[in-house]
Image (cartoon, rainbow, N blue to C red):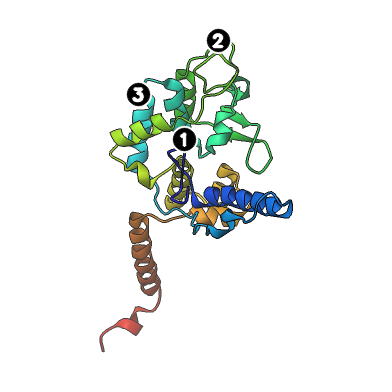
Amino acid sequence: MLEGRIHGQQYAPSTCNRALAILKTMGRYALRQDILEKNEADKIPLLKENNQRTRFFDADEIRRILDAAARYPNKAAGGLIAMLLLTGTRKSEMLNVMHKHIDRDNRSLFIPYTKNGRSRTVYLSEAALSIIDSIPRVGSNPYLFAIKDNGKPISEPRWAYEKILAECGIDKSEVCFHTTRHSVASLLVSSGQYSLYDVKAQLAHASIQSTERYAKLTPERMRQTGQGVTDLLLNTVTAGNNDDFSTP
């Protein structure tokens, strides 16, 4: 667990720290009740946390993932992965979507449960609607992403995600499901076409600071910005008095 793994699955240091904190608290309670003589959990140090991932998918990787997800045999699993990239929603939000939450007339998707405790509406592109239409209904199961007629959504399709990443030549150890959301935010901000407030609204962040954390400029965008500084300066000089810069 201290290496970030529980039952063979990798977890963030913050997740492991929360589990360890519970063990420490239980041990202290057991000490007070004379159940234990010492609390071994208190000897285990917490892991260093760094939740600000810098790895994200670029536009070409996103296109390849979307293509592979659309072709994936399990339409519910592939569709979920594609929808995360097409909307920027959290995995937990998308898994809880039911067929009744889809409004095709308004091209929108109602998200009943969010991390912030508020419901919200996400507007869909034609590509997103096409993905939704490709996912077959499973009996009377009300959930959009389902593979069994058991009244439950699909569980986290980590297996499908890893196969799709492998097909696209992406190292699975560098990314996680949340990388899809991170990448959408980064792509929108780096495009220069949308403000941080536009991205904040799309991702339903509670504060603009959360959006700024995701706003990582791509190297290409940084090169464009650097050139833009020069262009602005030269335009300013051209518009001014050129005699000041003439050769005597």
Could you tell me how far apart the alpha carbons at marks 2 and 3 are, in whole angstroms?
23 Å
- In front here: 23 or 247? 23
| Mark 1: secondary structure | helix
Q: Earlier in the sequence, mark 2 or mark 1?
A: 1
Is residue 11 visible to us here? yes
Could you tell me how far apart the alpha carbons at marks 1 and 3 are, in whole angstroms?
16 Å
Q: Earlier in the sequence, mark 2 or mark 3?
A: 3
x and y, in percent, of residue 135 in the image? 47, 19
* Residue at the image point whose x is 56% and y is 42% from the top: 202
Q: Which residue is mark 2?
A: 139
* Residue at the image point whose x is 64% and y is 55% from the top: 37
The amino acid type found where label 3 is placed reads Arg
Q: Which mark is residue 74?
A: none
x and y, in percent, of residue 157 in the image? 45, 29
| Mark 2: secondary structure | loop
Horizontal arrangement in the rendering, residue 211 relative to residue 29 (left or right): left
Q: Which dot, 2 or 3, sits closer to the camera? A: 2
| Mark 3: secondary structure | helix
The amino acid type found where label 1 is placed reads Leu
Q: Which residue is mark 3?
A: 71
